[in-house]
Image (spheres, rainbow, N blue to C red):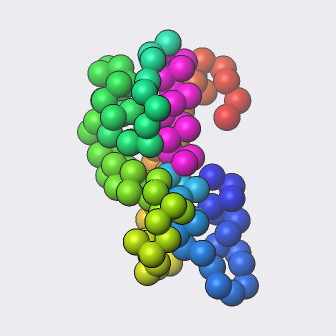
């Protein structure tokens, strides 16, 4: 998350697709941390919706994190650079905001349990 946020501070040639990629990675890791916390096995995947669907229903992440599903597309942006060549500041900013939303909801139970995140 810090890399995604810090990259915005570059003076020129800001790699917006890299920012979106790192935002996706952060969101994915937040969800996987939540699943580990709840002793829920998960497949090797970058698919945000698959991870959300594995979370305990009581957390209602399907509703609160629905917008974050868009981040899944950015998981492959580093591998297929031409596909996301034209990402903009707005796209990258939205990706970071979605990752923050993901963190807020996915990590909340861990923080409440006393973990420092």
Magenta segment includes 33:
yes
The residue positioned 69% from the left and 55% from the top of the image is: 2
Report the residue that reaches farthest toward the bottom: 12
Give the quadrant of the C terminus: top right
Q: Position of residue 60 (x, y in %)?
A: 30, 29
Q: Quadrant of residue 9?
A: bottom right
Magenta residue span: 25-38
Seen from the viewer's position, the closer of residues 53 and 110 is: 53
Identify the residue at horizontal 67%, vertical 24% (top origin). 115
At 43% across and 27% down in the image, what residue appears? Answer: 43
Tell which of 79 and 17 is nearer to you: 79
Residue 113 on image: x %, y %: 60, 18
Q: Is residue 109 visible?
A: no
**Residue 74 visible, this angle:** yes
Q: Is residue 58 above or below residue 61?
A: above
In the rendered structure, the answer to whether residue 33 lies left or right of residue 48 reads right
Magenta part, dominant SS: helix
Residue 76 magenta? no
The vertical placement of 49 against 76, above or below, is above
Q: Position of residue 75 (x, y in %)?
A: 47, 53
Q: Residue at x 62, y 61 (%)?
A: 4
Q: For the image shown, how many numbered marks are present on the structure?
A: 0
Work out whether 35 lies above or below 62: above
């Amino acid at each position: 998350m810090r890399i995604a946020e810090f990259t915005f501070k570059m003076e020129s040639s800001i790699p917006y697709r890299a920012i979106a990629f790192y935002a996706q990675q952060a969101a994915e890791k937040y969800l996987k941390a939540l699943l580990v916390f709840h002793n829920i096995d998960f497949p090797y995947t970058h698919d945000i919706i698959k991870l959300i669907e594995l979370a305990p229903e009581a957390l209602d992440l399907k509703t609160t994190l629905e917008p974050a599903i868009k981040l899944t597309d950015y998981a492959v942006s580093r591998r297929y650079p031409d596909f996301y060549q034209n990402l903009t500041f707005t796209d990258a900013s939205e990706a970071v905001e979605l990752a923050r939303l993901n963190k807020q909801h996915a990590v909340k139970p861990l923080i409440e349990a006393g973990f420092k995140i």
